[in-house]
Amino acid sequence: MTSRTTAALALVTALLAIYVFAIERRIDPRRDFSAVPVAKAAEISAIEISGAAGEIALARAAGGGWRMTAPLEDRADATEVDELVNTLLELKKLQTADGEDWPGAGEMGLGDTALKITLHGEGDRRIGTLALGDSTGVQGTVYARWEDGTPFLCWADLRLSADVSADALRDIRLLAVPVERMRRVKFKQDDTP
């Protein structure tokens, strides 16, 4: 390799390094791709889910865990609800869906038929609503929108976790007392018809 070729390659490498450095400086490292403006699960005190399966309301229980307040009063499966909350908080915007090349919100399924997840904070303060629409052309993604903001694409795992019946979020344990704390169980049969 001649010294002229080496110099040309060094120049191209230097220009490329300057270009990459200039581009990297313009990207804001604090840019947030989070779909939901909530930082911690503890900030959420209640969740309302409305969709094809009906309406479900969940609230944090006083002693920890979750309770279902609608469509019926019952204990909620804390593991399932906590997993739903974590999936919600980890949801990222993959791409915004704005501009003339994108379908309208109704065609994205973000209208009346959308699965809506409304979050409440302390003192029943409404945080906002996330609408999850139809599947996109990209496998495993759905259209979504926070409040009346710009629609975006996100992974469909939240929709799969939230679009369930109330029974799927109920605590299936017969008793709320852990088996380890039980000292005696008494069964009684009543013979009267």
Image: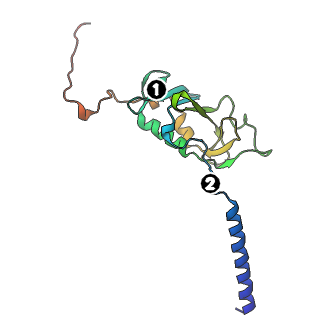
Crowding around mark 2 (Cα neighbors within 10 Å: few <14, some 14 to 19, many 20+) is few
> Along the horizontal axis of the image, is 101 left or right of 47?
right
- At label 2, which amino acid type do we have? Arg
Please, which colouring scheme is shown?
A: rainbow
Which sits in the foreground, 132 or 9? Answer: 9
Please give the name of the residue rendered at 54% of the width and 27% of the height, measured from the top-left corner: 124
> Which numbered mark, 1 or 2, is in the foreground of this view?
2
Give coordinates of residue 137: x percent, y percent.
68, 46
In the rendered image of this protein, does residue 30 appear above or below residue 7?
above
Q: Is residue 186 left or right of residue 85?
A: left
In the image shown, does 114 or 78 lie closer to the viewer? 78
Query: How many badges with numbers are in the image?
Result: 2
Q: Identify which amino acid the numbered label 1 is placed on.
A: Met
Query: Between disc 1 and disc 2, whose residue precedes?
Result: 2
Where residue 178 sits: x, y (%)? 29, 33
| Label placed on residue 30 | 2
Read off the residue under disc 1.
68
The percent position of residue 96, horizontal first and vertical second, equals 70, 47
